[in-house]
Image: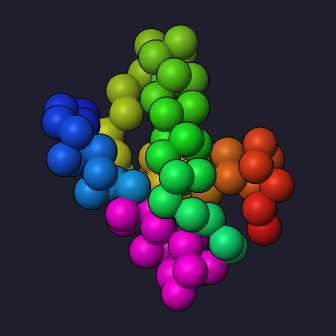
Amino acid sequence: MSIQTDQQLDEFVDYVFSFYGEGGIYPMGATLPLIQKATDDLIQILQIKNEEFCGDSIDRELVRDLLISKYNLN
């Protein structure tokens, strides 16, 4: 299943924030705007690779990897 609506995308960003944002399970200082930016980056990468963005835990971990590698969070 792929993300179809802006609401679903917002829910995914909130989901990622609950893991990597302030007070999250694995807090790394991620802000909502930064998670949104990393999510947009991931969607573009997946489109280039002709892969689907599903908004699942795999995509959450890929956003985390971008937050670390591209945005220098840890």
User: In the rendered structure, does residue 26 fall within the stretch colored magenta?
Assistant: yes
Task: Tell me the quadrant of the picture where the C terminus can be found.
Answer: bottom right
Q: Is residue 50 above or below residue 22?
A: above
Stretch in magenta: 14-27
Residue 39 position, x and y percent, is 49, 41
Q: Is residue 60 above or below residue 31?
A: above
Instruction: Classify residue 74 as left or right of residue 38.
Output: right
User: In the rendered structure, does residue 59 fall within the stretch colored magenta?
Assistant: no
Instruction: Classify residue 68 as left or right of residue 1.
Output: right
Instruction: Classify residue 10 as left or right of residue 59.
Output: left
What residue is at 67 percent from the left and 72 percent from the top? 29
Colour scheme shown: rainbow
Task: Tell me the quadrant of the picture where the N terminus can be found.
Answer: top left
What residue is at 39 percent from the left and 55 percent from the top? 13
- Evaluate whether residue 57 shows in this view: no
Residue 57 position, x and y percent, is 41, 57
Of all residues, the one furthest to the front in this rendering is: 33
What residue is at 49 percent from the left and 59 percent from the top? 32
What residue is at 75 percent from the left and 55 percent from the top? 68
Of all residues, the one furthest to the bottom in this rendering is: 23
- Evaluate whether residue 24 shows in this view: yes
Residue 70 position, x and y percent, is 77, 43
Of residue 34 and residue 51, the one placed in the foreground of this image is 34
Q: Where is residue 21, by image quadrant?
A: bottom right
Q: Where is residue 61, by image quadrant?
A: bottom right
Residue 72 position, x and y percent, is 82, 55
Counting every numbered tag in the picture gives 0
